[in-house]
Each structure stands twice: as C-alpha cells, then as structure tokens.
Amino acid sequence: MIFKREFKRNLKSLIIWSIVLSGLILMTLSIFPQFAQQQKEMTKLLEAYPEPIKKAFGMNELNMGDLIGFYGVEIYMMTTLLGSIYSAILASNILAKEENEKTIEFLLSKPVTRSQIVTEKLLAVLVNILILNVVSTIASMIGFQFAKDPDVPTDTFSLLIIATILLHLTFGAIAFMLSSILKKTRSILSVSLGVVLAAYFMNVMAGISEDLEFLKYFSPFKYVDAAAIINDNELEPLYIFIMVAVILISILTSYIVYRKKDIAV
Amino acid sequence: MKIVDIKNLTKTYNKNRGIINLTFSIEEGEIFGFIGPNGAGKSTTIRTLLNFIYPTSGSATIFGKDIIKDSKEIRQNVGYLPSEVHYYDDMKVIDLLKYSAGFYKKFNPKRMKELAERLDLDLHRKIEDLSFGNRKKVGIVQALLHEPKLLILDEPTSGLDPLMQNTFFELLTEEREKGTTIIFSSHILSEVQKMCDRVAIIKEGKLVKVETIENLTKNNLKYITVTFERAAQMDFELEGIVKKEVNGNEMTLLYSGDIKALLTRLNALSIKDLLIEEPTLEEVFMHYYEKGGIEK
C-alpha cells in the first residue's frame, strides 16, 4: 500500500528527472562524433587548459577522443552529480513529509508497524533510483550510436554504472536517515543537498590543489572516480566497502530511530 | 470484558505536562467520554493508546493486547478520528478512503457510499479544496468505514454544523447498537452528557474522577444569571445554591437544586432578565469536585 502510494506520488518528478537527464546525455553524446573528428585540435586545445582544471575533471587521465573516455569526463559527471541530487531530494522528503504535513496521524492509525512504513518507503527510494539509472543508461547506449565506432568495453561501462548507482544509494541513504530523525522537510532538504554539493566540491578541490588532496577521502565522488575505474578497470574494494557501510549504517539508524520515536503532530 | 485497561499510565514530555498516573478501564459496548479543558492530556492519552508516542511508565491494553507490542493488531480493529484532520492534498476524497481501506482486511464500497451520502460528502472532490468541516467528515467516514470494534474520537464535533452533529450522533448510536465501544473526547460537557455512559474527567494530566453520566447530571449544575430591576435582592437564599455572586443588580448563581423551585422563587421577584446556562468545565471542576460541596 505505502510503496504503491509513494511510487505514484513521486512518479511525476521521476519522469521529469528522467527526461531532463536523458536529454542532457543525448545532447552531449551527439557532439561526440565532431569532437572525435577534430580530436587532434581538441586535444591541443584541452592541453592548453590549466593543469588543475584538467585534474579536477579527470581530463588529464582520460582520452576524450575515446568514447568511454568522453563518457567518463562529460556524461559521468552529469549522471553522478544530478542523480545524487535527485536521490537526496527524494529520500529527504519521503519520511518527514508525513510528519511535516501531519498526515502521519492518519498513517499510524492504520494497522501498520513503523518498520513496515520505513521498509516500504525505503523500497520506493531504491526503485526510483534504479529506474532513473536504467533510463539514463539506456539514453547513454542510444547516444553511443551517434559515434562512428559505437562500441564501448562492456565491463568498464558496467562498472561505471554500478559505481553511479552505489553513489546515488549512498546519498539517498544519508538523506533517508535525516528524514527519519528530523521533522522539518525544508531543513532536511537543505542539509541533504548540502552534503551532496559539499562532497562534490571537496572532490573538485582535492583535484585542484595538492594541499587539499586529503579532502578526497571525505568525498564519495572520489570513490567513484571515472578515471580510476576506466584505467584500472575495477572498483576499489575499500571505497565500495565504505559506501556499503554508510548505506547500511544509515538504513539501520533510520529503523532504530523511527521505531522508537514519539510521533506527535 | 474490559476493552481498554489503563494502568498507571504516565507520559512526560521535555517541558509539557503530559499525563500522570492514569488508571481506569473501559467496558465493552459503552460510550466512554473523556473530558477536560484543552491541554489537560486527552489527546496525549489517546496518542499513547495508539502508540504514536511511547509511555514513560505504566502500561495499557486494548482488547487485552499490549498497546506497544501488539499495536498493529489492535489498530486492525480501531477507528481513529483525530481532532485536527490532515490528509494528502493531492488526493480526492475517494482516493483517500480507498487508500485507508486498503490497510484493512475488509473493504465495503457500499458502506463508503452510504456514509458519504448521510454526511453529505462529495467523494470526488479534492481534499485540498475542502473546508474544515468537510475534512472532518472525511475523517469520520475513514474512521467508521472498516467497522471497527473500538472507535476513538478526539474532539469529533469541532467544525461540524449542528445538523451534521446530529447525523454524526445518529451514526454513533447505530455503531453502538452493533456493539462497538466508543471513546469520545471533548471539552464540551453537554455533548458528552448527551452521548456517554461514563466519563473520565481529566485535569492537568491527572484523572479527577470516572463517573457515570447519571451521577454527573443528578446534581444538574446550572449557571444562572439573573438581572433584577433594582439592586436590592441580596437575601436570595435557596437550597441548592453552590455559589452566589452579586454585582450591582446582577446576580450569578451556580445552582444544583430543583429548577422548578428556583423559577417559583424568581417568579415572585421583579426580574428583568434570566439566563440559564451550562456551567463551564472549569466551574464544574472548581465547585463540583475540588470543594466537594454538593457531592454527597
């Protein structure tokens, strides 16, 4: 019941985000053929970029004339960042909204346990994130067809997709936990988005300045760095472990807090 | 059989008063009033019974089941109407009622239509566009729809016009004939008197008394304002006067005696105006209980 309701309630925003993200992916990939053709000039142009910028966006380690390299620099940035923002918005609202709008009195008077409420809402977040990723992956695969040589290494591409989903789930889980603890949806949303953007900029800053390099350990965006995944063709086990741990701890905390919470509106 | 059994139930918030050491029980099939001024702890008790909030100490059972451990099972057979009704703005009335019905084992669309018709509620309007009173009606249908064995109604009449209140009381009477137990909270004494078998009077989080309506109305406390033509009737004495105050040519009485005797007495005097009212709850508390003057 609750899952169905949440899915329906969030469907409109899922569709909008899917269309916007797919549109951006297709548009960006459509310029790749030209880009690849003029690769030599382009590479020269890119080399003229200041070193920190190149580092910040992984341009120095990836060959942008290569389809997967182009994906890693251009598309991957959009899917990871925009998808994380979507996940944070979605998850930060889902539990607290009922308290904020006082509809929780209705829901709690029905024969459902608190755990059931958390589980079904969590499932709604998971399914929405997965759908967004399926749609954006399909959009990328369609976009690849614009290229003269549309083949990308399947294993590397799969790793990038898995990393993206893990990243989204990490931010989603953190926002969900905040949603179980706090009551005011607006403040939860600001904190969740703050976490995503701070993580993103920490990653960028870490790339720009060597003094700030330590920041990268605080940023999940670094954990899913495209250059590392493409060049090594693997996900760093330590980073996977950290993200999975953050996800599990956040979910566990949500259950514990929500089950014991006094909910008075 | 005891439908609700509350033992030493205490809930203290950080600052708020909450409820302190409540102990009472509610029998099967009775309409039980829960009365006290705003902020006395009526809603807190109800929310604790439904496990929205956890008790600080003490315990309670509903249908013989623990309110914390078996809360889900209990709620399968409970209908709850909150004092302030808040629903999902994006839903139509019918969407909400179907969503609500989906949580229970039985759904009877015929009953939904009947209830809506009797309460004059349009099922196809958006909840967002409804007035406070109409939202309350949605709440009433939602609480009654699954034919619960226990109805918990928190200030159910607020926002309903008198005509609707009558329909609502009719519905409750029908439910009661089916054997439903009803808990009814209110701060309006007359309303509770009309419907309930017994009432728990609660004040500042503490139980003052559980009393049958019969006993409560036997003393028939009335608040009487008499305006005389001249200001010189200080010697007004009659059996049953609990409290007397004179202010110029106006006299206010708290009276629990025979109303006929009062009228006969007043008839002999030159009065300009007479007002007979229900005393406010505060007055009942102050004079009926604390001083305990006329109780025995």
Image (cartoon, rainbow, N blue to C red):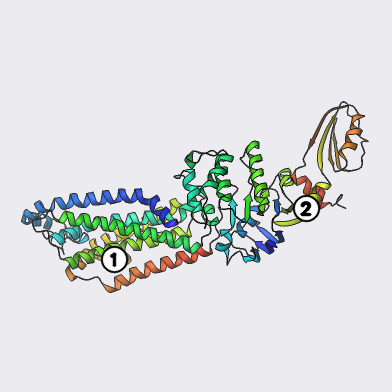
Picture quadrant where residue B208 is located: bottom right
Q: Find the distance from the CA under tag 2 to the CA under tag 1.
A: 71 Å
In the depicted structure, whether residue A16 falls above or below residue A118: above
Say which amino acid is labelled 1: Lys
- Horizontal and vertical percent position of residue A231: 17, 68
Badge 2 and badge 1 both on one subunit: no
- Horizontal and vertical percent position of residue A226: 21, 64
The residue under label 2 is: B212
Q: Nearer the viewer, residue B79 or B16?
A: B79
Residue at 15 percent of width and 66 percent of height: A153
Residue at 56 percent of width and 43 percent of height: B114
Q: Secondary structure at mark 2?
A: strand
Residue at 78 percent of width and 53 percent of height: B212
Q: Nearer the viewer, residue A214 or B147?
A: B147
- Horizontal and vertical percent position of residue A78: 25, 55
10 Å crowding of disc 2: few (<14), some (14-19), many (20+): some
Residue at the farthest front position: B110
Residue at 76 percent of width and 56 percent of height: B210
The residue under label 1 is: A216
How many numbered marks have been drawn onto this rendered protein structure? 2
- Horizontal and vertical percent position of residue A215: 30, 65
Left or right position of A20 against B101: left
Q: Visible in this render: residue B110? A: yes
Q: Nearer the viewer, residue B45 or A74?
A: B45
Left or right position of A12 against B290: left
Subunit ID for the residue under disc 2: B
In contact (CB < 8 Å): disc 2 and disc 1: no
